[in-house]
Image: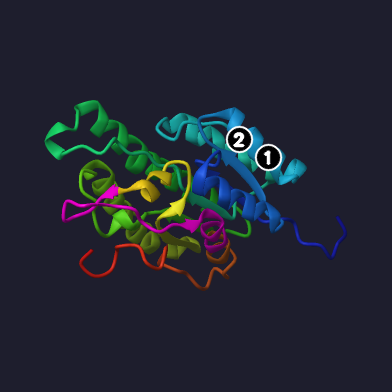
Amino acid sequence: MTGTEAAPRVALVTGAGTGIGRAAALELLAAGWSVALVGRREGLLEQVAQQSGAGARALVAPADVTDPEAVRAAFDRTVAHFGRLDLLFNNAGSGTPALPLEEVGVEQWKGVVDVNLNGMFWCLQNAFRVMQAQSPRGGRIINNGSISAHVPRPHAIAYTATKHAVAGLTKAASLEGRRHDIAVGQIDVGNARTELAERMTQGVLQANGEIASEPMIDVQIVGQSVRYMAELPLSANVLFHTVMATKMPFVGRG
């Protein structure tokens, strides 16, 4: 690297092995970022690293976000490898099968809360720890909220409740991040075509009890949205960004 070249910006992406996390990681790597790929399944993370062709700019860092010590270790490994952290895409999430609320089991409820709320907080907390201490200090955090951070689907109470909680995390962290030059925002995605969302095209329960297929968008569009938010100067922040299929039943009454 010559004296006129800037060092690559560094991102950590959770849930990077599949879906939205994978799309965002590939988009950032293609744009020249260095990216720590975090997730539970090392093999899938390796596939993303190989597909990117980014070489040493892609760090495979397996970790379960529900384990606070594993999360801390993943952040420490990222800083040890790349020298700093400029972006956390706080993406890892989980849900339950579609069930009426009275049928949701104790372990199902706890499992979703542990990933979607607790895990997101452990990552958020470690990003603050790193970003406020580095030089130059600061950075950006993008939480994956989902359309469900605003409106529920039938039979998805655990996912909906935790994603509403993510909006609270985003607002509180955005406020606390000001004094550390940390910008915190949220991306809310509606019907991106991923392995988990593919069923939407075959028909999904609507609020009026009907089963209807729903339009989808290419998940790469979400990756592009994450990159847009990530590359803003720290003096600007997108607090909430909604990207969705134009004709999905979100606005209005169905």
Quarter of the figure with the C terminus: bottom left
Residue at the far bottom in the pictured view = 236
Relative to 169, is 234 on the left or the right?
Answer: right
At a point 33% along the width and 43% down the height, the residue shown is: 117
In the rendered view, tell whether residue 69 sits above or below residue 141: above
Secondary structure found at label 1: helix
Q: Are marks 2 and 1 in contact (CB under 8 Å)?
A: yes
Judge by depth and name the residue closer to the eye, 113 or 6: 113
In the rendered view, tell whether residue 220 sits above or below residue 156: below
At a point 17% along the width and 51% down the height, the residue shown is: 209
Residue 215 is tagged as none
Residue at the far right in the pictured view = 2
In the rendered view, tell whether residue 32 sits above or below residue 59: below
Residue 45 is tagged as 2
Residue type at mark 1: give it.
Answer: Ala
Residue type at mark 2: give it.
Answer: Leu
At a point 75% along the width and 44% down the height, the residue shown is: 53
Residue 138 visible to an observer of this rendering: no
At a point 47% along the width and 69% down the height, the residue shown is: 237
